[in-house]
Amino acid sequence: MIYFPGIQQIPDPSVAGVTSSNGLNGQFSNKAITDSQGKLLLVNPVPGKNGTLGLKWVEGPPAVGFNANLIKRVRMTETKEFEFRMDVVNVLNHPNFSVPTPANLSINSTSFGRITTAGGNRRFTIGARLNF
């Protein structure tokens, strides 16, 4: 699942002139995010400053869940009954994508804006119980 289609990662413009001839590490890897027209959308803050983007600015995709259970009770005597039960979690077997992690919310990550894991397989639980 891609959160932001059409965005591109580019080297951070504020460090484009950093070279090893300046006595600095030439392998600086901060990135910036641009839209399809090349306008800057997200940039790392300058060193020593905090950015203005708040925490938890992206929420995960909604989870879809439809659960069901079937119960059959058989009365054996006046005070005793036997109960058969089947619980099903995620009856529709709909994949639920995972919530964003710091790895795919960092603009310096190659997986920025992508959620690649899903869960929520259909599960059956069968049980029996004697009530008295």
Image: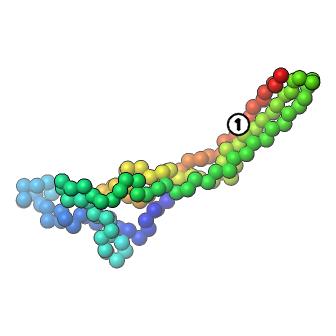
Q: Amino acid at mark 1?
A: Thr
Q: Is residue 29 visible?
A: no
Q: Quadrant of residue 24?
A: bottom left
Residue drawn at x 56%, y 47% is 119
- The residue that disc 1 covers is 125
Q: Quadrant of residue 49?
A: bottom left
Residue drawn at x 38%, y 68% is 7
Task: Estimate the x, y position of residue 101 in percent, counting from the top left.
Answer: 41, 49
Q: Quadrant of residue 78?
A: top right
Quadrant of the image for the C terminus? Answer: top right
Q: Count neighbours of disc 1 (C-alpha within 10 A) and say few if under 14, some if 14 to 19, many if 20 or more.
A: few
> Residue 10 vs residue 113: left or right?
left
> Residue 30 vs residue 68: left or right?
left
Residue drawn at x 31%, y 64% is 42
Task: Estimate the x, y position of residue 94 in percent, counting from the top left.
Answer: 63, 53
> Residue 117 vs residue 43: left or right?
right
Residue drawn at x 89%, y 23% is 79
Task: Estimate the x, y position of residue 47 in percent, counting from the top left.
Answer: 18, 55
Nearer to us in this view, 107 or 57: 57
- Which residue of the protein is positioned furthest toward the bottom in this rendering? 37
Nearer to us in this view, 37 or 49: 49
Q: Is 93 above or below relative to 44?
A: above
